[in-house]
Image (tube, grey):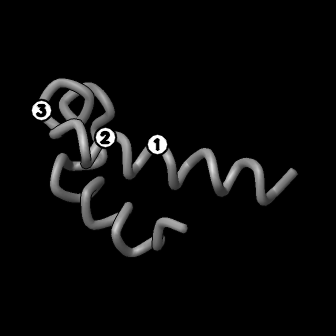
């Protein structure tokens, strides 16, 4: 399970801007954040 702190740290690195995050993030960072979002969405269902 991905930790919230890890996902937020990566999001802050790109200024919480999805466009720059999508273009500039490494594959691992992108996957980590999206996996965290998916886990949270599934948890809240």
Which label is found at residue 24? 3
**Disc 3/disc 1 C-alpha distance (Å):** 15 Å
Label 1 near label 3: C-beta < 8 Å? no
Q: Residue at the spot x=37%, y=42% of the render?
A: 31
Decide which of tag 3 and tag 2 comes sooner along the chain: 3
Considering the numbered disc 1 on the image, is that residue within a helix, a strand or a loop? helix
State the image quarter where residue 17 is shown.
Answer: top left
Q: Position of residue 23 (x, y in %)?
A: 17, 24
Count neighbours of disc 3 (C-alpha within 10 A) and say few if under 14, some if 14 to 19, many if 20 or more: few
Task: Please give left or right for residue 30 compared with residue 15 in the image.
Answer: right
Task: Please give left or right for residue 23 compared with residue 10 in the image.
Answer: left
Task: Please say if 28 is above or below 9.
Answer: above
Q: Residue at the spot x=32%, y=33% of the render?
A: 18
Considering the numbered disc 3 on the image, is that residue within a helix, a strand or a loop? helix
Q: Residue at the spot x=27%, y=66% of the render?
A: 9
Label 2 near label 3: C-beta < 8 Å? no
Label 2 near label 1: C-beta < 8 Å? yes
Considering the numbered disc 2 on the image, is that residue within a helix, a strand or a loop? helix
Per the image, the residue denoted by label 2 is 30
Q: Position of residue 29 (x, y in %)?
A: 25, 48
Which label is found at residue 34? 1
Task: Please give left or right for residue 34 compared with residue 15 in the image.
Answer: right
Count neighbours of disc 1 (C-alpha within 10 A) and say few if under 14, some if 14 to 19, many if 20 or more: few
Q: Quadrant of the N terminus?
A: bottom right
Q: Residue at the spot x=66%, y=56% of the render?
A: 40
């Amino acid at each position: 399970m991905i930790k919230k702190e890890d996902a937020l740290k990566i999001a802050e690195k790109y200024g919480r801007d999805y466009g720059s995050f999508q273009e500039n993030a490494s594959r691992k960072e992108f996957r980590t954040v999206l996996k965290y979002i998916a886990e949270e969405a599934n948890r809240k269902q």
